[in-house]
Amino acid sequence: MSIKIENLTHVYMEGSPFEKKALDDVNIEITDGEFIALIGHTGSGKSTLIQHINGLLKPTSGKIIIDGVDITEKKLNLNFIRKKVGLVFQYPEYQLFEETIEKDIAFGPKNLGLNSEDVSGRVKKAMSMVGLDYEEYKDKSPFELSGGQKRRVAIAGVVAMEPKMLILDEPTAGLDPKGRDDILGQIKNLHDEYNMTIILVSHSMEDVAKLADRIIVMNKGKCILDGSPAEIFNKIDVLESVGLAVPQVTYMAKKLREKGINISKNVFTVDQAKKELLKILNKR
């Protein structure tokens, strides 16, 4: 699946005294199977951008083309987009409402008009994909679960629609360390095992460094950087100028280089730092 965003601009409350340009001539191309992190300071345009990709917002100008179809066409059936692009909002567990986990996950597929057998199959598959045992959890109330488990159910509800792309807006917000690690592990699993294209919106540079193959940086409605983690995180001055940072371990490696220790510039995770330091120690 391919997505082309061409000259995308969005103005909130256009023509009013409160007019605000949230997106300003954004051009991005996304190909099948990528794991993309979307980062930027609060108000940079991240949330507005992802809601355009899912068809929740219409652009003031510009186009979004998914698999060759311009989704900004006025008469387009939005079911086309929902089947292609799944969007998980921040704190998605607040959208849980059914009596049981099975019913909650089944809600989306039912609305696609699928028969009961197909719906059941999708529920089982989605629960498996997010690491929830069907027999153990299907009859439980979603409100009895921990925060991390609730979030898995909410993600499963979107995954059950079988999108080719999954967009997650701060999926670990408010979770304890275990819940956070569990959710990130499941997201990585969706990408690695099911070749699902992922767009992860996150303020955690550590999470971004561990997971993403590509990073897009937003600032004041514009896409200002787009590249691999090495390309982006080596531009510390640019990131700091727009209120962002690099992973803490990257700052540590920079300090070590300033003290004359020959450690790689491409250290963005704890594992990378460990390997580099062991390499240095083994040479001594």
Image (cartoon, grey):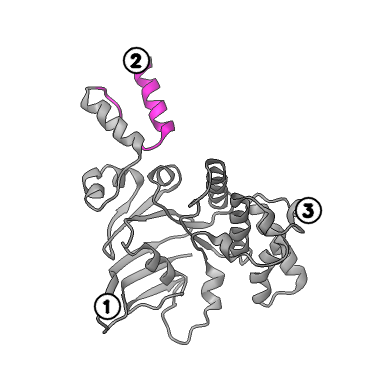
Residue most toward the bottom?
Answer: 75
3D distance between C-alphas at marks 3 and 1: 51 Å
Contact between marks 2 and 3 (CB within 8 A): the answer is no
Residue designated by label 2: 283
Does residue 266 appear in the picture of this structure?
no
Residue nearest the viewer, comparing 161 with 283? 161
Q: Circle 2 sits in a helix, a strand or a loop, which is it?
A: loop
Residue 213 % position (x, y): 41, 48
- Residue 84's disc number: none
Of the numbered discs 2 and 3, the one sitting upstream in the chain is 3
150 w.r.t. 181: above or below? below
Q: Residues within 10 Å of mark 2 (few under 14, many from 20)?
A: few
Which numbered disc, 2 or 3, marks the residue closer to the eye? 3
Residue flagged by tag 2: what amino acid is it? Lys
Compared across the picture, whether 185 is left or right of 138 comes to: left
- Viewer-nearest of labels 3 and 1? 1
Q: Which residue is the site of mark 3?
A: 135
- For residue 19, the mark is 1
| Image location of residue 53, percent across then percent down | 43, 69
Q: Which residues are magenta?
A: 261-281
Residue plotted at (38% across, 67% down)? 49
Front position among marks 2 and 1: 1
Q: Nearer the viewer, residue 5 or 219?
A: 219
Left or right? Give the position of 87 relative to 147. left
